[in-house]
Amino acid sequence: MNKQNILFIGFILIVALLLFNHRNKLQDEVKNSFQTLAHVEKDGVLLNDLRGRWENKKNRKKVIRFLRNFNPRPKVKTRGDKTTFIFEAMDKNRLNKLSKKILQSTIKIRKFTIEKVDKHNAILKLEVDK
């Protein structure tokens, strides 16, 4: 074999290796794209479920009724599309029960503040969408 054939075969081998490397990179990108698509589909199903829960007026009314009838009774202020509940002088157990119920519900919370009054009591202010 002459020198040109050896150089030509070496060139072809280098090009083949580069193409093989490029093909592997493309396969990895496609695999990552499919994983991302599966993750997005899973999140989409979850968000759709949450949207359905948030739009459930029966559940929202049930939670609002629970808040209005909670002991001690709150001060309720309604303005436009928001309702504010102010619970005063709540002990730790009642505050814990109420905050668990609120945070586990699917109502849209605009504002949730807890102010410590003394060692055993606190004030809870809750602002929710109507």
Image (cartoon, helix red, strand yellow):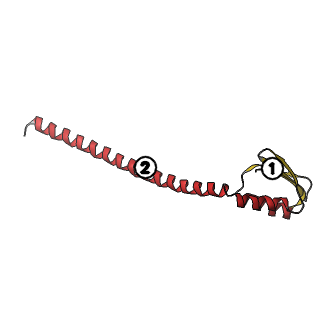
Residue type at the position of mark 1: Thr
Res 98 seen here: no
Mark positioned earlier in the residue sequence (2 or 1): 2
The N terminus appears in which quarter of the rendering?
top left
Say whether residue 128 is left or right of residue 41.
right
Q: Is residue 68 above or below residue 128?
A: below
Question: Label 2 amino acid?
Answer: Ser
Query: Mark 2: which secondary structure?
Result: helix
Toward the viewer: 113 or 74?
74
User: Which residue is depicted at the point 82% across and 50% down?
Assistant: 84
Q: Position of residue 22 (x, y in %)?
A: 32, 43
Left or right: residue 81 versus residue 94 is left
Numbered disc total: 2
Residue 37 appears in the rendering: yes
Q: Residue furthest top?
A: 4
Q: Position of residue 16 (x, y in %)?
A: 23, 44
Is residue 122 left or right of 61 when viewed as pictured? right
Q: Nearer the viewer, residue 22 or 58?
A: 58
Q: Position of residue 118 (x, y in %)?
A: 92, 55
Circle 1 crowding by C-alpha within 10 Å: few under 14, some 14–19, many from 20: some
How far apart, in angstroms, are the residues tagged by discs 2 and 1?
A: 44 Å
Q: Residue at x 39, y 47 (%)?
A: 29
Task: Find disc 1 in the rendering and name its residue.
Answer: 83
* CA neighbours of label 2 inside 10 A, class few (<14), some (14 to 19), many (20+): few
Residue with the mark numbered 2: 33
Label drawn at residue 14 = none
> Left of 27 or right of it: where is 88?
right
**Residue 92, horizontal then vertical, whole percent:** 86, 62
Comparing labels 2 and 1, the label whose residue is closer to the camera = 1
Mark 1 secondary-structure assignment: strand
Residue positioned 58% across, 55% down in the render:
48
Instruction: Please report contact status of discs 2 and 1: CB closer than 8 Å, yes or no.
Output: no
